[in-house]
DNA sequence: TGGCGATTCTAGCAGCGCTAGAGAACCTGT
DNA sequence: ACAGGTTCTCTAGCGCTGCTAGAATCGCCA
């Protein structure tokens, strides 16, 4: 038993190694740098090893994205619970969300833009993928008025996401970012 | 003179052929189908011909996207001028925008998601790229209140964009689309 | 220590964007 | 009408991609 246990432990360890190596590569050199060859070189194994852990490159990126969701959730939660009144809490969560996207642009892209096949909004959605959404929802709860809270959360989240991706793709005036965020909050946090 | 004129005419004609072929391929078979080889085959020339017209594949996609902006502008304008009161006009423009994105998902992606290097929001921005934005702005003008109109337009547009891309990537409950749109209008069209 | 299973590697496939240099087509001047 | 020169277009190929079959190697057990 012990031998098999060690092997599985080593396997799991190497799987973590692959994911963190992919994330490092993604964040430090951007999307184009994440190739199976470079990844294999970084973990000091040959390419086919990657395929014994993941079905393909997109599965690796899905794992990276999932790890990113855990981080994002932590940052949102910290922002929400630190703030005082609901108005400030929502502003803090939105700012934290925007900050995450700006500090990890490539990772953010993997999480939200890439058509990576993660099961969202379905019964089998992993908790990491739910929790970031739930932080947003709790921050929005005081402002639901007579709107459905889930619909409100999805809409506000979409607006925030839109601001970030369009800015990143240079579709928006770059230095008006804070004004847009403030305007959005003005329309939702009342 | 006439010979050179004919040559330039033929060249321009072939350039249009390339762009429409690329758009056809993009819309009918998706992004992955648009390869230089398939494109060359479709226009019945060899690959290098493409590079005598465009700097590279991304320049071709930029041309496709620009053509898309012209179409989008026309649809937004029709929607805005057909509607009656400002509230309905904004709703109609938003619906037209969403409809365009749904009917041409791959084209929409080329226009807004792809990091295609088109000069937005700069002095040398081609008119096609401005006008769609301007339609949105005019629809929003009655609702600016004490907010800056440009900031309002960018924010509303981002929200709309976010709703569409997150839905397309299955991050939102698919059939709540209309409710989210209505909620967004409720927060902006007052 | 020899043999067997599991694991890992080498080598290669088909496809990608892109380009150098060969070849064909065309216009021009005699 | 034809040779010369220019302009255009094609063939062939480079280095890269994600991915995989089959060979080789390693580690465990008798």
Image (cartoon, coloured by chain):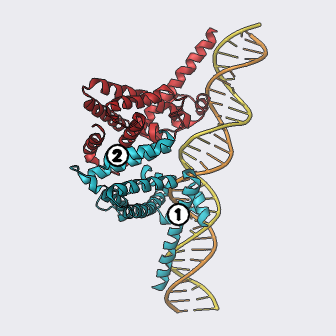
Chain colours: A red, B cyan, C orange, D yellow
SS assignment at label 1:
helix
Residue B5: image tag: none
**Earlier along the polypeptide chain: callout 1 or callout 2?**
1
Residue A103 position, x and y percent, is 34, 35
Disc 2 residue crowd, few under 14, some 14–19, many 20+, Cα 10 Å: some
- Which of B16 and A76 lies nearest the eye of the viewer? A76
Residue B131 position, x and y percent, is 35, 62
Q: Is residue B170 above or below residue B18?
A: above
- Tell me which residue sits at (30%, 32%) in the image: A90
Q: Chain of mark 2?
A: B
Mark 1 or 2, closer to the camera? 2
Residue A102 position, x and y percent, is 34, 38
Q: Examine the image and state in which quarter residue B38 appears.
A: bottom right
Residue annotated with mark 2: B186
- Which of D4 and A87 lies nearest the eye of the viewer? A87
- Tell me which residue sits at (51%, 36%) in the image: A38
- Tell me which residue sits at (55%, 63%) in the image: B21
**Quick one: which residue is furthest to the left in this view?**
B146
Residue B115 seen:
no
Residue A124 position, x and y percent, is 55, 28
Q: CA distance from mark 1 to mark 2?
A: 48 Å
- Tell me which residue sits at (39%, 48%) in the image: B160
- Which of A143 and A7 lies nearest the eye of the viewer? A143
Residue A58 seen:
yes
């Amino acid at each position: 038993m012990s031998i098999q246990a060690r092997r599985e432990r080593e396997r799991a360890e190497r799987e973590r190694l692959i994911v963190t190596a992919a994330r490092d590569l993604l964040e430090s050199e951007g999307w184009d740098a994440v190739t199976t060859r470079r990844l294999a070189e970084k973990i000091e194994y040959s390419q086919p090893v990657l395929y014994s852990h993941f079905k393909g490159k997109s599965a690796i990126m899905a794992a990276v994205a999932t790890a990113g969701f855990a981080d994002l959730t932590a940052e949102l939660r910290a922002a929400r619970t630190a703030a005082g009144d609901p108005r400030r809490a929502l502003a803090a969560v939105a700012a934290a969300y925007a900050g995450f996207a700006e500090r990890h642009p490539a990772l953010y892209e993997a999480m939200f833009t890439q058509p990576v096949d993660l099961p969202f909004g379905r019964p089998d959605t992993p908790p990491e993928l739910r929790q970031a959404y739930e932080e947003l929802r709790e921050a929005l709860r005081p402002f639901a008025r007579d709107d459905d809270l889930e619909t409100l959360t999805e809409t506000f989240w979409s607006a925030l996401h839109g601001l970030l991706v369009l800015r990143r793709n240079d579709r928006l005036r770059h230095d008006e970012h804070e004004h847009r965020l403030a305007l959005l909050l003005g329309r939702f946090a009342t």
